[in-house]
Each structure stands twice: as C-alpha cells, then as structure tokens.
Amino acid sequence: MKIHPNDEALEEFLLSLGDQHRRLVRHLTWCNYCRSRLVYLPRPLPLSPETGKGAGSGYDQTVSASRRAVSATN
C-alpha cells in the first residue's frame, strides 16, 4: 500500500469497521490530542528475561489488548 491510500481504499476500510470503531476513527480525525497519542502507540512490550521477546507477545494478545483499550474509551 502507498503511504496515502486512495478514496476507494479509505472508504472500504471505514465500511469494514463496526459503528463503534467508525465513531472512534471519526473522533481521531478531529481530535489533535488523541491523534498525537497515536504516534507512540502501540507501546513496545517489555522484554521477557527468559525468551528475550516481548512479554506476552503474540497476535491474539495484542488484538485483545487493543480491543480492551478501545472499549475503555467508550
């Protein structure tokens, strides 16, 4: 994907979201404070001493954490 997606790709993305996530995206387009916070999110996970990988690393855990964060904002 290019850095700037075309209108069709943006519309497809927005339509793929549920109402709650679409409202969040709309908020992010207008709120400078929240938009500035996106720069450092998601935060890197702390390293596990045993594996040297992020503690609790894994796609499912990351998605779950993201869902909890979005739910907490509503």
Image (cartoon, grey):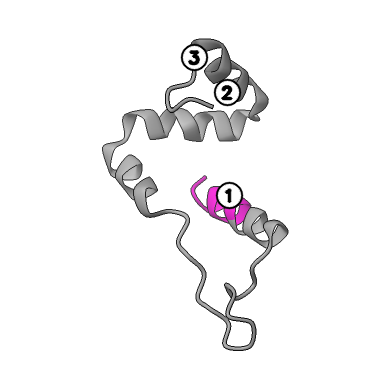
Which mark sits nearer the N-terminus, 1 or 2? 2
Q: Main secondary structure of the magenta part?
A: helix
Residue at figure coordinates x 57%, y 35% from the top left: 21
Reply above or below: 48 against 7: below
Q: CA distance from mark 1 to mark 2?
A: 18 Å
In the displayed orientation, state which residue is furthest to the left. 32
Reply above or below: 60 against 55: above
**Classed neighbour count for the residue bearing mark 3: other residues with Cα under 10 Å, few (<14), some (14–19), many (≥20):** few
Does the magenta portion include 72? yes
In the displayed orientation, state which residue is furthest to the bottom. 50
**Classed neighbour count for the residue bearing mark 2: other residues with Cα under 10 Å, few (<14), some (14–19), many (≥20):** some
Which mark sits nearer the N-terminus, 2 or 3? 3
Q: CA distance from mark 1 to mark 3?
A: 29 Å
**Classed neighbour count for the residue bearing mark 1: other residues with Cα under 10 Å, few (<14), some (14–19), many (≥20):** few
Q: Which residues are magenta?
A: 66-74
Q: Which residue is mark 1?
A: 71
Residue at figure coordinates x 39%, y 46% from the top left: 38
Q: Which mark is residue 47?
A: none
In the rendered structure, which amino acid carries the disc numbered 1? Ser
Which mark sits nearer the N-terminus, 1 or 3? 3
Find numbered disc 1 in the image and state the secondary structure of the residue it sits on.
helix
Q: Quadrant of the N terminus?
A: top right
Does the magenta portion include 30? no
Find numbered disc 3 in the image and state the secondary structure of the residue it sits on.
loop
Front one among 70 and 60: 60
In the rendered structure, which amino acid carries the disc numbered 2? Leu
In the displayed structure, does residue 40 sit left or right of residue 33?
right
Residue at figure coordinates x 37%, y 29% from the top left: 29
Q: Which residue is mark 3?
A: 6
Q: Which residue is mark 2?
A: 14
In the displayed orientation, state which residue is furthest to the top. 8
In the displayed structure, does residue 13 sit left or right of residue 2?
right
